[in-house]
Amino acid sequence: MLRKTVWGVILAILLCSPVALGAEASPFVQGYIEGYLIRINNTEEAGRTAEIETYEGQRYVLTVHPQARFMIDDRLVNWSDLYSGMEVYGTIQGRQLHTLEGYSTAQLGFINPGSKVRKGVITKINSDSLEIRSQDGSRLTYRLLPGTIVLRQGQSVSAGTLYTGDRVKLFFDDINTDVISRIEVQGDSIQVKDIYRGRMTSVDAYSNRLLVDNLERFYNGRWQDTPPNYSLTYTRGLPLYYGGQVIPERNWTYLRGKTVYLISKNLLGRETVDRAIVKSQYESGYTDKIDSINWFAESLELKSHRNLRLNEGTIVIKNGRLQDRYVLSPGDDVYIVADGSGSSAAMANIVYILNEDINNSAMGQHFLYCGTIDQIFEDRIWLDRYHMLNQHEWERYTEDKELYYDMDSDFYNLETQTLISGEELYAGDYVVDEREDRARDLNLEDWFAWIYTEGDRIAAMAVQKEFEGRGDRITTGRVTGIVDDNLVGWTLTLGDSRDWSSRREAWVPKSTDLRINVAKAMIVRNGEIITADQLKPGERLYIVRSDFRAHVVIVL
């Protein structure tokens, strides 16, 4: 009887225990967790965490160990390969997730083409690869093939139009491949709108606004006043640097009254601060050429033998885009805003790279020619006595140059200011035998051409009757306005401009806006000829001109 009583008590305890009632044991006690992945978060404050829902419906947020391993179907992958809703199993040690394995619901290791996606900023462009910096700061290199599709604003463009500093989405057709199948450039939101300097008066953390007094805008190589009592919106998580260190947002109020440099961009049509640096000592400005860079010591030396320190907060701008500091190279023409006391090497707060070119990376194979047309056939032309632009200077050649065209090549008659077809080019009087009676009677001569090529393929070509100068001045800058002048036709205003100086072998910034007439210029955007009224404010241009008149305009 006693034995039956004891067994009854034990049975009652078991029936009333949490396990018997179906309650879930803690994964920290079990040493593992299994269920469904909700998301993986990555923040500066909490680091990387994984939110997992167990089969029983309980949700846990687990800290991920820095050396954690991630797998899908027994294959090692990056943490970003795991997706929400995936069935997972993870091991836990010391209340941290050390491994996490996901199980695909389809064929092992198989993904739908294009469903593997990576996001980041381009930090390096090679002839057949891209280096991308992701949001967590990691750097990975992916391969490009000739068949890789590149989209900018929904339009297919060549890989040669990619810039370091572009924010991109990369798509892959296999989970284990590093070959990019498609690239989407994330619009103009990553381009720098303006550079400001002012005295920080207050921070409105509730509405994410910075109030700045004595605000100046860096424009045409100097600081210029802006309207008083200016405020700028900033994005949550804005990195603000002081003395090379990131300052938490809760401590920004202690920096009131100090000079702050702000880099803004257009975000969804609204000007927003993307980077900020607070001056810690004394400001200096230098326009010079980089002589050498010591990446081990994180410093650079200018041609003037002045040494400047680099740090995580150094803002680098090139091609109108925010850049990684590793894009800096010896030979770059730069304007630098430095911060230092004079007793030691100052810190480079802002490095503005002045260099521009019609090829912005190793992928570019664009060339600009000008010369007299010698022969035209159905798919090619020959130039006689031509010049080719090399490093912003014209090189003269006496031999003929053979170039090819196709049905996608654009041709423009500068005399009539109309587009013409390849058939019209071939059938026209653009090339003549000057010994023939008809040519002498009608005073016909070979026409002159401006040609923009991809390798030896003609992308865009403009023709005119007479040689009017090859354009001895090379200018770059940003469009601030474009008007159809009643007297001279389409004329643009160029700000933040600079001329190439052959004597100095450097870009020389202009101190005022330039007016340049483009009424009889070949204007090229993405390898296609456009009209002057299609130019947009804010676009960066590379211009071949003879003083006021432009001959060739290339939208960069």
Image (cartoon, helix red, strand yellow):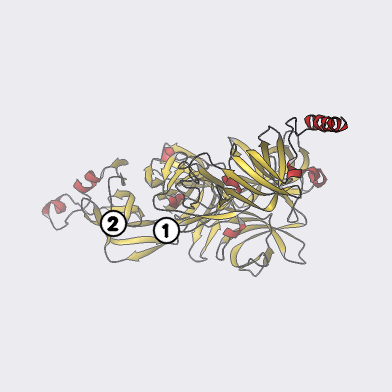
Residue 396 can be seen, yes or no: yes
Tag shown at residue 403: 2
Image marks 1 and 2: residues in contact by CB distance under 8 Å: no
Q: Position of residue 118 (x, y in %)?
A: 54, 46
Q: Residues within 10 Å of mark 1 (few under 14, many from 20)?
A: some
Amino acid type of the residue that numbered disc 1 sits on in the rendered structure: Asp
Relative height, residue 176 to residue 505 (above, below): above
| Disc 1 from disc 2: Cα separation | 23 Å
Amino acid type of the residue that numbered disc 2 sits on in the rendered structure: Leu
Q: Secondary structure at mark 1?
A: loop
Q: Nearer the viewer, residue 159 or 397?
A: 159
- Locate residue 328: give its quadrant: bottom right
Nearest to the eye among marks 1 and 2: give it. Answer: 2
Tag shown at residue 330: none
**Sequence-wise, which precedes: disc 1 or disc 2?**
2
Residue at the image point whose x is 32% and y is 41% from the top: 417
Q: How many marks?
A: 2
- Locate residue 253: give its quadrant: top right
Relative height, residue 398 to residue 210 (above, below): below
Residue at the image point whose x is 38% and y is 64% from the top: 395
Residue at the image point whose x is 41% and y is 43% from the top: 156
Q: Secondary structure at mark 2?
A: strand
Q: Position of residue 50 (x, y in %)?
A: 67, 42
Q: Residues within 10 Å of mark 2 (few under 14, many from 20)?
A: some
Q: Position of residue 217 (x, y in %)?
A: 65, 46
Label 1 sits on residue = 472
Q: Quadrant of the N terminus?
A: top right
